[in-house]
Amino acid sequence: MQLSHRTIMQMGRYREMNLAGVAPDTLLQLYRQMLRLRRTEEAMLREYHPADEMRCPIHFCIGQESVPAALSLLVQRDDFMFSHHRSHGYFFAKNSPLRELFAEIYGKATGASGGKAGSQDISHSETHFYSGAILAGAVSIAVGAAFGFKHRQTRQIAISGFGEGCTDEGAFWEAMNYAGKQKLPVLFVCENNRYATFSDQLKRQANDNVSERVRPFGVRATPIFGNDSVLAYRTLGAEIERLRNGDGPALVEAYTYRWNSHVGPEDDGANAYRTAEEMQFWKDNCPISLLGEKLRGTGHLSDALNARYEAEIGDEIAANFKFAKESPFPTDTNWRRMNYDDASPVADKLLGTIAGGSAFDQYQAEAKLGPY
Amino acid sequence: MSRQLSYAKAILEATDQAMSLSPDVVVLGQLVDTKSGIFGTTTGLVDKHGPDRVQDFPVAENLMTATAMGAALTGLRPVLCHQRLDFMVYSLDAIVNWLGLWRFKSNMKSGMPVTIRTIVGKGWGQGPQHSKNLQAWFAHIPGLRVAVPSTAYDAKGLLLEAIFGETPTLFVEGRGLYSMTDDVPEKPYRVRFGQAAIRREGRDATIVAVGMMVPLALRAAAMLEKENISVEVIDPRTIAPLDRKTICDSAFKTRRLVVADPTWQSFGSAAEIITCVAENLGDKLKAKPIRVTLPDSHTPMSSALETEYYPDENDIVAAVRQTLA
């Protein structure tokens, strides 16, 4: 049976989490990373109003911690990560410095993008993290990075995170076609959270999955219950290993759910696009609780350890807020320099300069175009 | 020793030399690896530099630009080729939403050395979907450079400068210019962006001519010389950045301005050029400036109408006379 939001809703509480083959230390890290992302997002959400110091749209990812946490344990520093506008999870997944995320959202000079981009356009070049709000555009650029890696014969990979809404766009399918044809080292991570803003996938597409349709393009696809973080870790890890060995591309479709509104902390329930029953189902299957209960059952997670994690994470978040709030606003208004790089060190090195001009003869006939 | 080379061959030579100078240069485009090679501008590159560096691309223009961007992030310097600018319009998302603002958005930490060659057709019934010149669109976008070479010399120098620069470049080629020859040095050399060329010096009026209008403007100047009218012809060579100083200096000298631009009139590059002169020395001009452009209409196929549609040297001569009347 094809996994989909409809079939998942029929299963009740998820009971299939299997910890076999993953070291306890890794499982605890996975748990801690999810908790860290959750608490970070919750803190931002609380602080958003009425302070109104984070003056940009934020698309919170509470409920979708599993995939970013798993990726954060699997990516290498020189891998490239491309995200959509719901970017915090992927910024986190690339292990980019969280305090620069905080400062960016506060519009400060110390932000990852110097306060120019905000939550939905943030990038951090030093850790090769890039995002943007024009969905399939970022998927396409990830394919280009993979093209570069293949051309250079490195073992780097490109990771492209997106939601199922992105697959409405033609650019997405251009990317699938080329990645499949060229066997590029790119991992497509589709977090299928069912809704593009308020629009159900089945209002927009004939099928409520992405996996079935990418396979004919030569893209290997694995649908999973995305809130099983151990399954996500295992699946993503196996695909990343295959990609590094030249066996690409791959897509992992992780079914998951955002708990909050499409954007911002306000409730968007007035649009009546999802049911209370559905929201309850996904809260019952919270990725953090699912793994937490398992780890308590095996004795690896105690109340004391959990409290220690909470305290450490709380301290980190407080320090990040402090950094963001105390950082200066940007003051440079050299608009030209922001947009154009007038230096050309490579041209300076490789090209000679020849003064003087040409002896252009204006009486020559222009080219006659022939039959195309 | 001077050496004559056609505009098309100059583009081929620049690309070939760029690929020899740096292994980072790759060429992507539909049919770039075929013998016909984009009207001869890529012919033979695949044999010399190999199929990894000269790659045919699916008919997926948006992805092509995005692929170049991602590849540039890994250190490559891609050169894209579009047989017609009209086809490139599919890649507007990649160009407008991503390429042009990459440097800005990354807080100047990340560059995008991508060169997009794009060809504007003219004549022999190219019609409304093979002849559009949308150069002004791209000059409007911050973060993009737009080259409009009119000579083989400039085509080579500007293409090398574009490929080895750090700001993404739209390289707009006039198909009509492909067979025109010029004195082109063999060695790689640079033509800088934002430096207009004074194609011909004169006293009585200034013609700023862009791209395919440059040879026409020079012919017009030669015709007017016979009437003892001395015309200065300025070729901006790049419209982004635009060498406003050279244009204004010439207009200040002659006090009369005609702008010949091979694009639609309204909101086009001619409007920007006249604006920059008006803002700087509007009250110094002795006559109202005049635009010689395409009409605000799509291109007709029929040769009978094409002749009417495209301005020629006589239209430029008439415009200059009007400024002197």
Image (cartoon, coloured by chain):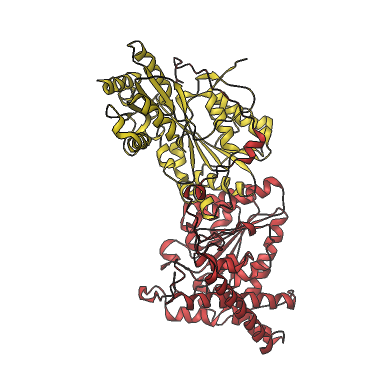
Q: Colour of chain B?
A: yellow
In which image quadrant can residue A30 be found?
bottom right
The extreme left residue here reads B325
Output the letter for the chain in red.
A
With respect to residue B135, does B311 lie above or below? above
Evaluate whether residue A280 shows in this view.
Answer: yes
B280 on left or right of A350: left
Residue B188: image location, x then y, percent: 63, 28
Res B50 visible: no
Q: Is residue A133 above or below residue A26?
A: above
- In percent of width and height, residue A352 lies at 64, 30
In the image, farthest residue toward the top: B226
Indicate the quadrant containing the N terminus of chain A: top left, top right, bottom left or bottom right: bottom right
Which sits in the foreground, B321 or B96? B321
Residue at left offset 50%, top offset 67%: A105
Q: Position of residue A67 (x, y in %)?
A: 60, 69
Q: Nearer the viewer, residue B46 or A224?
A: B46
Tell which of B152 and A68 is nearer to you. B152
